[in-house]
Each structure stands twice: as structure tokens, then as C-alpha cells.
Image (spheres, grey):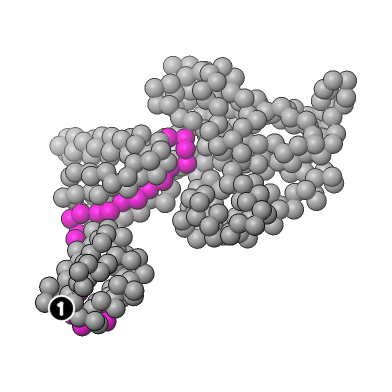
Amino acid sequence: MDIEIIEMAERRGKFILKNSSPAMANALRRTMLSDIPKMAIDKVEFHLGPIMVDDKEYESVTPLFDEIIAHRLGMVPVPTDYELFTYQDKCVCGGEGCPSCTIMYSLNKIGPCTVYSGDMIPLGNAELKVKDEFIPIVELTDGQAVLIYATAVMGTVKKHVKWQAAFGVGYKYLPIITIDANKANDSDVLRVIKLCPRHVFEEKGGKIVVKNSTDCSLCMSCVAPSNGAITINSDDKNFFFTFETDGSLTAKQLLDKATEILSSEASELLSQVEAL
Amino acid sequence: MIIPVRCFTCGKVVGSAYPEYVKRVGMGEDPKKVLDDLGFERYCCRRMIVSHADLIGEIAPLG
């Protein structure tokens, strides 16, 4: 099993999984979706009662219920560093909460304003500031204020979607497009260039050629109009993967972690089978 | 009410793009082009932004 990287940006990746099988491709997809641990805000404490700022009294009232604000804070992607953090129940502190398993954020704003995710200030390490700074959390009018302490912990999506690091993870069989060389300059076949919804073909020297075969969605809409000159097959040993991350991990970190988890789970299964 | 933080279907963060989308469309840009620019490829995320009715400003004074 090999991986050929096509594109690896900070938050999105494309790669070809080579010499593999449909079962392995799906195992990798499911691992990326559901087994990657990340940090997300899990506990939110609201200050209730009047908030005094510069001798003016503000009410701790917002247009949204506290539960909804807590949920919105939970969905905000929090930077995750596997070197710094571990699961709370496996931490040296025994689950009490310490700087190596939790991140504390404070959010203190007075109205009128829009509260953004970037207003959350990490207590301690300033590098843990949220990267997506302009996610609206709530709007406040004059006389309203929020004073919130939020705690982020490590988790996986099996408990809640806020711990989902990857999304839009998908793969397809790698398309194999063959063009009959004797018919490549027929006018009927050249018409297919415009018919293809993914613009896979182009004209070169009066003949139809494949421009980018990985764009093909195997829709087969080129096969019938070309009267057999074009055939599309799918390769069930090579897979074209695309995925995105929410910004808590980079695309490369996520793929590395997914392969690491998959191989450790496979070796664990092997050791259990051998013990039988 | 207020723009959801993430796409209901796939989980992509859409909240941070909404203020920019509103600003750019208000200045006369084509909504299709703005959504493409902001990196929304799937129609699940695009509908989150296009179909949103931002009413929090009307609710806020009643809090």
C-alpha cells in the first residue's frame, strides 16, 4: 500500500492510494472520519449576575440561551498538538484537569458588539488561540455582557461531532480512460469534449486526448455518444482520495495520525488472533 | 437566527465565512463567485450560507 500525494494544503488534501483494496480504502476513510483525536471545548462556565466594567453595570443576559452559546463554543475548532496534550482520563493528573490535558479559555465582552471566536483568550500558552477568528458566537446589545470560562479537552467523534477533525473524506476508484486511436479524430467523438461535465478531454492536433483523468467522475456520459471509441473503466486497486480538516490539525498531521492509528489497530488485531 | 458554526451535513466551518460573504455580496459581487473564492465546493456548505436568515439583531434587544 502506497500513498502518492497530489495536493497537501494546510486544510485540504488529495492523494492516490496505490496497490490497495476497496476494504483498505474504506478502512482509511473511516479512520480519518471517526478515530482522530482532537481538542474541543467540553465544559463552559458562565458568570451569572451583574458584571461591572468602568463603573457601569452590565447584565449577564444574551439573546441566545447559555446552552446554545456553550454548544457554539464547542463547535469552534481548537488548535491541537499531540506533543502537548493527551486524553484527560489517561493524563498524569488522573482526570482532574491540568495543563497537559486541558486548555482554558476566557471570554469577556461587553455590548453592544458581536462576540467572535477570536475573542476567546487562552489562559497560558498564547499559541493556543483559535485560528478561525471570525466565527460569530453571539450578538450583544447595550447593557449586555458575557463572562465565560471554557475548558477544552481531547476526544474523538464517537462521543460528539465537535471532536471530528476531518470532513468531506471521500474516495473513488481511479478512472482508466481509453480512446480508440483510429476514431480519435471523428467529429462525433470530438463532440464528447463538450459533453463531459468534468471537462476531462481536450482537443490536440484535431484529435481528442485525455487532459486530466483524475477529474473523471465515472459518469459514463461520454461512452454512448462516442460509438465505442471511448471506454471508461475503474481500477479497484488504486483510489483517489480527497479530504479536508477543520483547522485544528493540518491535513498532513491528520493523514499521518490516521495511518498510525490504522496500522496500530491492525497489529493489535493480529496479536489478538495469534493469542487464540 | 445566527449563522451556525458548522455545516449541518459535512461539518465544515461556515461561521467565519458568513460576515465576509455578506460584505462582498453587499458590494455587488456575484454570490457564486464569492462562495467559490471562500472554498465552498459542496452544495451542503453553500446552502448553509445562501439560505441563512440573520435575525439575531432583531432578537438581541429583547434579551
Which stretch is magenta? A224-249
Q: Residue at x 20, y 80 (%)?
A: A186
Image quarter in which the C terminus of chain A is found: top left
Q: Is residue A239 left or right of residue A118?
A: left
| Horizontal and vertical percent position of residue A224 | 25, 81
Q: What amino acid is labelled 1 in the image?
A: Lys
| Horizontal and vertical percent position of residue A130 | 55, 31
Q: Which residue is mark 1?
A: A183
Relative to the observer, which residue lies in front, B41 or B59? B41
Q: Is residue B13 left or right of residue A12?
A: right
Give yes or no for residue A158 being in the magenta stretch: no
Residue A90 appears in the picture as rendered:
no
Residue A264: quarter of image: top left
Q: Secondary structure at mark 1?
A: helix
Q: Residue at x 70, y 36 (%)?
A: A115
Give yes or no for residue A229 being in the magenta stretch: yes
The image shows a total of numbered marks equal to 1
| Horizontal and vertical percent position of residue A250 | 40, 36
